[in-house]
Image (cartoon, rainbow, N blue to C red):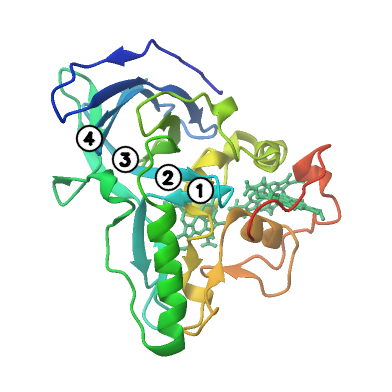
Amino acid sequence: MLRTNKRKLLLLPTMLLVIAFAVAALTYTAIASGHSAQAAAKITSVTVNNGEITVHFDMQNYAADQVSLEFTIAKWVNEKVGWISMLQRNRIYEEGATEVIRAGNLRESVTKDKGGFAYTFKHRDNPIDFRDGAYWTHNKPAADGAYGDYINMILSEIERHGKWDPDAIYRIGVTSRQDERFTAVTYFTGRGTTVEAANVPGQSDALVSCLSCHPGAEFKAHSNRRHDQGLCLSCHNNFTYDSMNSAAEPDGWAKIDMLTMIHSIHAGIEGYKVAKTDYSNVPSFMTNCAACHGDTTPVPVRGY
Ligand code: HEC
Ligand code: HEC
Ligand code: HEC
């Protein structure tokens, strides 16, 4: 199920003030079981051209020339020992819910051309220049007084940690938005160098262990669209909050980073909800750290 593919680094012509790298992208593709159509995306390379990022991919077992996908991109932040999305947005889940901040994605129907399938991160047809830092696809929330201070503190953290860093490691996710269920993930530095998944920090043992109970990375959440547990961290990190269960007051936003959310879901806490789903009835595994952390003793190393 996990596939690796490494190709030679290929250097594109370099012009004055234009730096272009083509990256041999290390790819692994999760193909979900249980769905009749077994199409899969396989990322072949990532190109970093100034701050514009293009991901090239093949579609396996797939006849059509068009495919509907969502794209995510996140940066590893050493200081936070965690990920931050390079796509940010506000979120009001439904009328009456609290406006919060959450990681975003970009959705696009991509058509094959003679070079195969390729997508350049863009918003309203304009390529995004990630040298400007984390990109806001929607408005930033605003507020006055102490609540405003709280929001501004989060915004300034996002600005600081979401800065473009050529030496940082980035993760791109290519996820199906159509009947087939698949996710392809790849890692590279801002300079365009491939990074093998095994050398990426924050690939927690806890996440690898999910498969013993959730074979095929089948999660009901997100209509079972998102596979690959690493991908979850691109959004479920310190900068994503749950609009439905938050309050419009200082420290009032509900955290849904993986640690908080996955510990809480598997603890069978009375009344624990994410969005509108009540997870009170999930059996508790929280007396059995090894179920998820294996033989290692998890130590709190990050700023949760
Ligand atoms: C010891 C078995 C076990 C392990 C290990 C485990 N889970 Fe679960 N998980 C369950 C059970 C049982 C449920 C509740 C039944 C259900 O909804 O599938 C559940 C529910 C969930 C849900 C909510 C329902 C859904 O499918 O969206 C998520 C998300 C989830 N688990 C993610 C994870 C992740 C991520 C990991 C790894 C860090 C993990 N689980 C490890 C047993 C496990
Ligand atoms: C593109 C960002 C993104 C990715 C990728 C992502 N999530 Fe989420 N997820 C969210 C947000 C944001 C919410 C809260 C609801 C909302 O605002 O849409 C959420 C909600 C959830 C919920 C609660 C859903 C409900 O209705 O009860 C679970 C469980 C969950 N995510 C698990 C996962 C798992 C497991 C993965 C990886 C396989 C994952 N998510 C990947 C952004 C993401
Ligand atoms: C259902 C799966 C599951 C169980 C059971 C579980 N954890 Fe975790 N744990 C996670 C996930 C998921 C993360 C977040 C990993 C990440 O963000 O990369 C995590 C992270 C942690 C961390 C943070 C590690 C770090 O890198 O900062 C600590 C500490 C931790 N768990 C302690 C525990 C302890 C103690 C227990 C038993 C009482 C436990 N966990 C049981 C899933 C689980």
The residue pinned by badge 3 equals 69
Q: Secondary structure at mark 1?
A: strand
Q: Kindly identify the amino acid type of the residue bearing the numbered disc 3.
A: Leu
Q: Kindly identify the amino acid type of the residue bearing the numbered disc 4.
A: Asn
The residue pinned by badge 1 equals 83
Disc 4/disc 3 C-alpha distance (Å): 24 Å
Of the numbered discs 2 and 4, the one sitting upstream in the chain is 4
Of the numbered discs 4 and 3, the one sitting upstream in the chain is 4
Residue at (77, 47) in percent of width and height: 298
In this view, the mark in front (3 or 1): 1
Q: Position of residue 249 (x, y in %)?
A: 49, 85
Disc 2/disc 1 C-alpha distance (Å): 6 Å
Disc 1/disc 4 C-alpha distance (Å): 22 Å
Q: Look at the picture and state if 115 lies above or below 254.
A: above
Task: Give the numbered dot on residue 74.
Answer: 2
Tell whether 78 sits left or right of 271. Answer: left
Tell whether 284 sits left or right of 150. Answer: right
Crowding around mark 4 (Cα neighbors within 10 Å: few <14, some 14 to 19, many 20+) is some
